[in-house]
Each structure stands twice: as structure tokens, then as C-alpha cells.
Amino acid sequence: MTGYKRVLLKLSGEVFGGGQVGLDLDVINTVAHEIADVARTGVEVAIVVGGGNFFRGAELQQRGMERARADYMGMLGTVMNCLALQDLIEKNGVETRVQTAITMGQVAEPYIPRRAIRHMEKGRVVIFGAGAGMPFFSTDTVAAQRALETKCEVILMGKQGVDGVYDADPKTNPDAVQFERLTYDEYLARDLKVADATAISLARDNYLDMVFFNLSTPGTIARAVKGEKIGTTVSV
Ligand code: UDP
């Protein structure tokens, strides 16, 4: 077990809200502390931030909004999460840079992949916000795209309170069984919903593994980065 040198961590909005709407700074600080510890060991870390704790475009659409506009609101929500995470990682003593797919020069750099790689090489944690900058995409898909473009070795999908991928929703079905390993084709054939199909097929087509694990268990980010067997690994 050698561990990874450069990882892409995906944090869903649920993590930022601690399961609620808005921000739970205590929960974010716990995660920020673990990320800072991992970065200090010399592992290069990029993070894609979700935004479901503020807005999900599809939900706003059901309430009558135009989908593309609602999706832009969703993307802007991810940026607030980025800034909260940036603040708390820096308070834990590690430098960071936020890069957004929608330009907003006062608060973040634009997404420039080669510069993101350079930041990581200098020991800075890079936080990617505003999704892909395009409606009808998800931050899971962006996680796969950013991981590929910035040459991360694995996508670590941090979940709030869920240990990995199950054959049914463990929150509603007590008989749900967790997978230890799964191929991308099995994942798609079972129509599982933990990450969306676009993200899964992008990772599959480019031979990039995804590890789904429970962020609520202390120390899991470090264990995932070391390549320890935790949660569910999805691979080709
Ligand atoms: N979103 C988008 N394009 C992107 C990424 C995100 O339109 O490239 C919007 C979309 O409305 C989505 C919201 O931003 O519902 C929040 O992202 P996501 O649902 O992926 O966050 P998570 O589920 O990880 O909290």
C-alpha cells in the first residue's frame, strides 16, 4: 500500500450543511482539519465542492423556475461553500486557492488547469467552485473532469453519513447491502444514484477509480489517501 500522490476530493453540499440548508461551520472545520493534515504530509489535494445545501437546479425547476437559471443559482451556491472551506483550511495552517468556472475576480481565480497543478506542486490545496460553469451538469461530473485535467490519480467521493455504495438507499431501506468493489458497468447496469451516470461514464472511459466513503467517520480522508480499503471502490 503506497498511497496516492495527488487526489481529487469531492465534497457534496450535504457535507457543508451537515444535512441542513446553509453552512455548519463545525462540520466544515472538522473536514478542513483533516484535509490540512493530509496536505501537510505532502499529498497534493484538489477539491470539487457541491452545492446541494443551498440550491439544486432540478428542485428549483420543480418549483417553477427555468432550469438553466436555477442551475446557475446552484453553481453560485457552491462558491459560498468554497469560501467557507478556504477560510477553515487556511485557519488550519495550509495555503489554498479557489478557482471558479464562472469568473468572479474579486473572490477567486478563474479555472486555469495548469495553474491549479502548479498550486498543488507548491503545497496549496486547490478548491474548484461553480461546477463546470454550465447548466445541466453536476458537480460529480465536474469532479471527474477536473481530476482528469489536473492529473489526479483517484476521485475520493466524501459522503455525509453513508459508508459507500449500496444496492438500495440505506437511509430508507434497512436491508440495503454495501458493495466493497463494483465495476462501472455494474454500477450503470444497476442504475445506482450515488453519483450521476455522466460522471460514472466519464471516469470509466478514462480508467479513473472512484472511492465512495463516509466523511463523518474521523480519519477517513487520510485512510482513503493512503489507499486503505474503505467504503466502496468503483473501477473499470
Ligand atoms: N450545477 C450546474 N452545473 C455544474 C455543477 C452544478 O448547473 O456544472 C448546479 C446544479 O443545479 C446542481 C447545483 O449546481 O443541482 C449544485 O450542485 P450538485 O447538485 O452537484 O451538488 P451536490 O449534490 O454535490 O451537493
Image: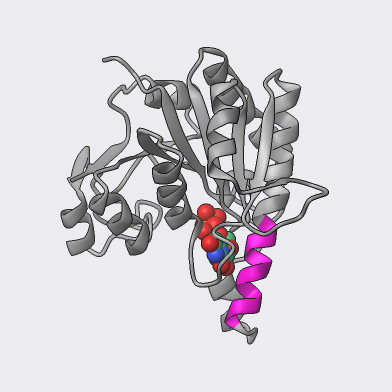
Residue 43 % position (x, y)? 48, 20
Visible in this render: residue 25?
Answer: yes
Q: Is residue 35 left or right of residue 93?
A: left
Residue 229 % position (x, y)? 27, 26
Q: Taking 220 as reference, is 185 above or below it?
A: below
- Quick one: 169 or 111, which is closer to the camera? 111
Which residues lie in the magenta part? 67-77
Q: Residue at position x 22%, y 37% from top?
A: 180
Q: Quadrant of the N terminus?
A: top left
Q: Residue at position x 76%, y 55% from top?
A: 104
- Quick one: 123 or 235, which is closer to the camera? 123
Q: Taking 183 as reference, is 37 above or below it?
A: above
Residue 220 % position (x, y)? 44, 26
Q: Taking 59 as reference, is 92 above or below it?
A: above
Residue 33 % position (x, y)? 63, 23
Query: How many numbered badges does the structure rendering display?
Result: 0
Q: Residue at position x 76%, y 23% from top?
A: 91
Q: Residue furthest front?
A: 114
Q: Taking 235 as reference, is 95 above or below it?
A: above
Q: Residue furthest right?
A: 106
Q: Main secondary structure of the magenta part?
A: helix
Q: Is residue 155 left or right of residue 41?
A: left
Q: Quadrant of ligand 1?
A: bottom right
**In the rendered structure, does residue 107 fall within the stretch colored magenta?**
no
Q: Quadrant of residue 130?
A: bottom right
Visible in this render: residue 18?
Answer: no
Colour pattern: one colour
Q: Residue at position x 21%, y 52% from top?
A: 184
Q: Quadrant of residue 54?
A: bottom right
